[in-house]
Image (cartoon, grey):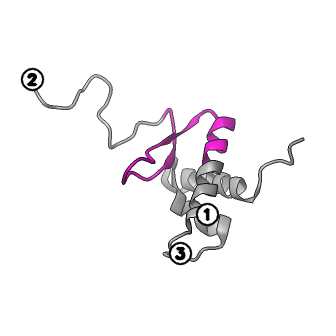
Amino acid sequence: MSRGPGKVERAVAHAVRRSSRALGRVYVEIEDVVGDACGVSLGAKPKRAQRVAIARAMGSFVRKYTVYGLVGGRGTTPLRIVRLDEPDPGLPKAGQGSGKEA
């Protein structure tokens, strides 16, 4: 029996709501959640266990709310939650290609 979302998942949901209100679009990274979820002060680097717990909660959040998705998380690209129906300004629009001619 589920006991509902935990402290970290509630912090993820709060960060998504806050990002949506402040920016007009959803763009949430682990660093946006770590202060609420783990009590880490602003600018301090979270421990590995804290980052893993937040990443797991972000995955759980996007499974429950399918209008959101996870992008990045490989190499130097930070893991972030985005709203799937919003265009990402860093990506080319559909049909534009890379801009290089063959």
Residue 77: % across, % down: 38, 51
Image quarter of the N terminus: top right
Q: Secondary structure under badge 1?
A: helix
Residue 59 belongs to the span the image colors magenta = yes
**For the point 61% across and 69% down, which residue is it?**
35
15 vs 31, nearest the viewer: 31
Mark 1 residue type = Gln
For the residue marked with disc 2, what is the amino acid?
Ala
- Mark number for residue 102? 2
- Is 64 in front, or is 52? 52
Q: Which residues are magenta?
A: 58-85
User: Farthest residue toward the left?
Assistant: 102
Residue position for label 3: 42
Please report the residue visible at 50 percent of the width from the left and 72 percent of the height from the top.
45
Direction from residue 26 to residue 2 in the image, left or right: right
Q: Amino acid at mark 3?
A: Leu
Which quadrant of the rendered structure holds the C terminus? Answer: top left
Which of the 4 quarters of the picture holds residue 6? Answer: bottom right
For marks 2 and 1 on the same chain, the one whose residue lies earlier in the sequence: 1
Q: Which residue is mark 1?
A: 50
Mark 2 Cα within 10 Å, few/some/many (few <14, many 20+)? few
Distance between mark 1 and mark 3 Cα atoms: 14 Å
On the image, which quarter does residue 98 sit in?
Answer: top left
Task: Check if mark 3's residue and mark 2's residue have beta carbons within 8 Å.
Answer: no
Q: What is the x, y in percent for residue 31?
A: 52, 63
Point out the residue furthest to the front here.
Answer: 49
